[in-house]
Amino acid sequence: MDQRTSKRILVLCNIPQAGLEQVLFAPVGQTQFYLGITLLEGRPWNECVQEWKQKLIPTWKVAVCFWPVVQTFNFAYVAEKNRVVVVSVASFMWTIFLSYMHHMQQDSLPGFLHKKISREQTNHEE
């Protein structure tokens, strides 16, 4: 088997793995981040939950686009000895993004990150 075929198989095997990580782990990790950071700031529990509700889905949207690409690239094209470095750099960038999301207000987020609000929720709040 030539090297291109083995890389193609490796990429095809890593895509479902990266997707599964985003479905199973990302919501748990992001929940821990938002609840933990707001609690450490000394904010009341209801504010912590409100921030989590507002920012979990927008953050997850970005994670689904970011991490599968990073992981697939890392396993398919980066030498094994350098994979930890690549993931460390990506994790650093992700931490910067999480900090950005934590400090942004919901209404000032870019349009594609806004959490969709159903008409029922809008009518309920009025």
Image (cartoon, helix red, strand yellow):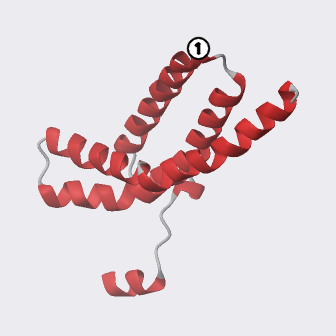
Which residue is depicted at the point 78% across and 32% down? Answer: 7
Relative side of 126 to 95, left or right: left
What residue did someone put label 1 on? 82
**Residue 96 occupies quadrant:** top left
Where residue 104 appears, as percent x and y from the top left, is: 40, 45
Please give the name of the residue rendered at 64% of the width and 29% of the height, measured from the top-left corner: 75
Q: Is residue 12 above or below residue 6?
A: below
The residue lying at 70 percent from left, 29 percent from top is: 76
Q: From what the image shows, is residue 104 above or below residue 91?
A: below
Tell me the crowding category of disc 1: few under 14, some 14 to 19, or many 20 or more residues within 10 angstroms, Cα based.
few
| Secondary element type, mark 1 | helix
For the C terminus, the image quarter is: bottom left
Q: Left or right? Give the position of 58 relative to 123.
A: right
- Residue at image position (39%, 81%) is 121
In the picture provided, is 122 more to the left or to the right than 77?
Answer: left
Rendering quarter of residue 18: top right
Image-based side of 17 in relation to 54, left or right: right
Identity of the amino acid at label 1? Asn
Residue closer to the observer: 118 or 76: 76
* In front of the other: 41 or 95: 95
Furthest residue to the top? 81
* Residue 126 appears in the rendering: no
